[in-house]
Image (cartoon, helix red, strand yellow):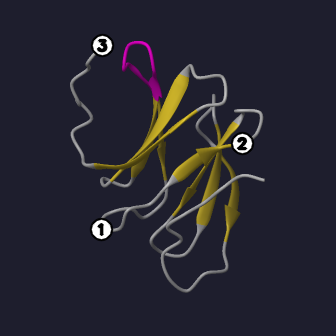
Amino acid sequence: RLHADDLGAPVTSVHVSRDGNVAAASCLDGSARLLEVATGTQLNLYTGHAHEKYALESCFAHNDAYLCSGSEDGRVLVWRLVEATVAAELKGHDRAACSVDWH
């Protein structure tokens, strides 16, 4: 089934949760969005990171309880998936943190 992109901003990456029910879309408007895979409905919005010109990635925690994303200002942010609140902010890069992975 095909769904139209109604996010209103270019998407630089999409990652599907381990259970396959939701996907995280990293967008060039400084947001990451949680989407229901079956319908494309936006379930949550995550902001606070810089994302305007580079292809940044997001990823889910091993238990799908958190979403992690890089930022163009060198930070990595971790949000609580359901609440969409920042659980951790990691600093340590001088340039954009483009790729993240949960271990």
Between the residue at mark 2 and the residue at mark 1, the CA separation in whole angstroms equals: 25 Å
Between residue 74 and residue 63, name the one nearer to us: 63
Circle 3 crowding by C-alpha within 10 Å: few under 14, some 14–19, many from 20: few
| Labelled disc at residue 61 | 2
Does residue 36 belong to the magenta stretch?
yes
Q: Secondary structure at mark 3?
A: loop
Does residue 48 belong to the magenta stretch?
no
The residue depicted at 58 percent of the width and 70 percent of the height is 75
Residue bearing the label numbered 3: 1
Does 78 sit above or below residue 42?
below
Q: Secondary structure at mark 1?
A: loop
Between residue 99 and residue 88, name the one nearer to us: 99
The segment highlighted magenta reads 35-43
Q: Quadrant of residue 66?
A: top right
Amino acid type of the residue tagged 1 in the rendering: Lys
Q: Viewer-nearest of labels 1 and 3?
A: 3
Expressed as whole percent of the image width and height from the top left, the position of residue 77 reads 61, 57
Between the residue at mark 1 and the residue at mark 3, the CA separation in whole angstroms equals: 30 Å
The residue depicted at 44 percent of the width and 60 percent of the height is 56
Nearer-N-terminus badge (1/3): 3
Amino acid type of the residue tagged 2 in the rendering: Ala
Expressed as whole percent of the image width and height from the top left, the position of residue 9 reads 24, 46
The residue depicted at 60 percent of the width and 60 percent of the height is 100
| Labelled disc at residue 53 | 1
Q: Secondary structure at mark 2?
A: loop
Does 14 sit above or below residue 102?
above
